[in-house]
Amino acid sequence: MSTYLGMPTVRPQPPRTPESPLRWGPSFPEAAHETLANTQMRANLNRATHTIRDKRAAVVAEVPDWEELRDAGSAIKHQVMSTLPDLLAELEANVTAHGGVVHWARDAAEANRIVTDLVRATGARDVVKVKSMATQEIGLNEHLAAAGITALETDLAELIVQLAGDMPSHILVPAIHRNREEIREIFAARMGEVPPDLTDDPRALAMAARAHLRRAFLGAKVAVSGANFAVAQTGTISVVESEGNGRMCLTLPDTLITVMGIEKLVPAFRDLEVFTQLLPRSSTGERMNPYTSLWTGVTPGDGPQSFHLVLLDNGRTKALADDVGRSALSCIRCSACLNVCPVYEHAGGHAYGSVYPGPIGAILTPQLTGMGTGAPDPHDPAASLPFASSLCGACYEVCPVKIDIPTALVHLRNRAVEAEARDRAVPTGWAVAMKALSPVMASGRLMRWGGRAARLGRLLARGERIRSLPLPVVSGWMTSRDVPAPPTESFRDWWSRTHPDPAGGPGARSEPAAGSGAEAPPHAPGGPRAPGAGAAGNDESEAL
C-alpha cells in the first residue's frame, strides 16, 4: 500500500509490461485461440457492443444529412493528409503565439523523454491523466513509473484497467471485456478507501471511483492529456469526453502537457462543427458529448499557466507515404468499427496485441510499425493483423469519415503475402493452390464450370454444412470452421433458366441485365459498392 497525494491506494504494475504497446504478444491467430476460450469475456463483449451499436443506429437515424456529414468529414481529413506539413507549421505558430510551448517527438522514446523532463522540471512526483490513446501507444505510464513518477488514470475504464494491471481491449471503452462483478472485485482488492459494503451496482461503483479520484484532482499540479482535435487556424486544442474527469484535469493543475498524434489536425475552427456531430453519435451513441473542452495556449489567471504540446510522429509519416494505407490516419478514434466487427466481438481486443484493436487497429498498427512502406517482416506479429477480418465491409458502413478499411486490409495483405513469398525458398501448398486457381478466377467461363464442379462438395456435407475436407491444403483451415454446402444451382444457372434469351430460345444462357434488379448486394463481389474489391469521449457506464 502506498499513497497518492496523501490518499491511500495501491500502485499496481501490469503483469506483463509490453516492450512495445503497438505490438505485444504472439500473432493474432495464436492469441485468438486463447481469447476465444474465454466465454465470460465473449459474453461481456457481445452485450456491450450490441448495446452501443443499437444506440448509435438510433441517433444516426435522426440526422437527415448523415451521409453528407460523413462526406464532409472525409473531405476534411483528406485535406489534412494532403497539406499536413503546412498545417503543422501553422498550428505551432498559433500555439506559441498564445503562450504554449510546442515539442516535436519523432518516436515513442523521444516523446517519453520530453514528458518526463517536463514533469521533473515542475518538481511533481504525481500526475493525473486524461484518457489518451497516444500516451498508451508510447507506453508513457510505464516510462514515468521507471522515473519514479506516478501517473493516475482518471477515466473510469482506464482506472479499472490500471488497477487490474490489465491491458486495454477497446479504443473507447478499454475495460469493455470486464463485467460489473469483476469490476467490484478489482475495486475491493486494489483501490484504497473502498466502502466495505460496495456492491456491483453501476452507480455504487462510479461513486466509489469518484471518491477515490476527487482528492487527486484537487491536489494535482501536473496533468497529461491527449487530444481529439487541434485547430491549425487558431492553435486551439479540443478534448471530448463523457465523465467530466477530463475537464477536472484540463482546468485545475498548474501545468498541462498534451501528447497528440500529428494527424489529429483540422484546418479551420469551423471544421469542428462537422466532427462534434460525427464523433459522439459514432462512439457512444450520444447526440453530443457531455463535456467538450477547448483551450488555446495559456490564459492568465484561468486554468493551467504552463501548457506544452508534444506533437508525436511515431510512424505516422511512414503511413503518410503509403497512398492506400494513409487512410488509417483519418481515424477519429470513435470505435464504431469495433462495435460492428464480428471478428472483434468474438476474439476480443487483447488478441490484436496492440493498443489499437479491431478493424482500424488491423490497418493502423501495421502502418505505424512500417508495414506499408519498404519490405515488411513476415515474422512481425503485426503482419498477421490485416488477415484478422472477414472483409464483410460493416466497418466501412459505420465509419464516420468513410475510411475504406477493407481496401486497406487487402492492400496490406498483398504486401504481407509478397514479403512471405520472397522469404521462402519453396512456396507453401496454399501458395501453389492459389497460383493454380488464378486462371479460373480470371475467367468467367472457367469460373462457371468450376462452380458446377464444386457442387460435388455436397457429397461431403452433413445436412447443409461441410465440416471437414480431405484436401491437405484446406484440411487445417476446416479444423476451426465449417462452410455452407454448395447450392444445387448457381445464380448464373438460375438466371439462364428463368430469363431465357429471346434470340436463343428457352434455356439459352444470358447474363443479368443492368438495372434488372438482380444486382449483387452491397459488399458482395461485384456489388455496387464493395470496399476492398477495387484492390484484389467515453460512456464508461457501458463497461459496468
Image (cartoon, helix red, strand yellow):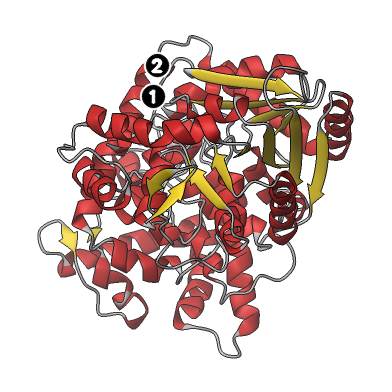
The residue lying toward the viewer, choosing from 517 and 205, is: 205
Left or right: 95, with 201 as reference point: right
Q: What's the residue at 47%, 58% (across, down)?
A: 445
**Total numbered labels placed on residues in the image:** 2
Q: What's the residue at 40%, 39% (across, down)?
A: 173
Quadrant hosting residue 235: top right
Residue that protrudes farthest toward the bottom in the picture: 425
- The residue tagged 1 is 56
| Element class at badge 1 | helix
| Element class at badge 2 | helix
The residue lying toward the viewer, choosing from 448 and 197, is: 197
Left or right: 447, with 304 as reference point: left
Q: What's the residue at 27%, 36% (across, down)?
A: 544
Left or right: 391, with 177 as reference point: right
Do tag 2 and tag 1 residues touch (Cβ < 8 Å)? yes
Residue 127 place in picture, x, y as percent: 58, 43
Residue 245 place in picture, x, y as percent: 48, 29
Question: The N terminus lies in which quarter of the figure?
Answer: bottom left
- The residue tagged 2 is 59
Q: Amino acid at mark 1?
A: Arg
Residue that protrudes farthest toward the front in the picture: 6
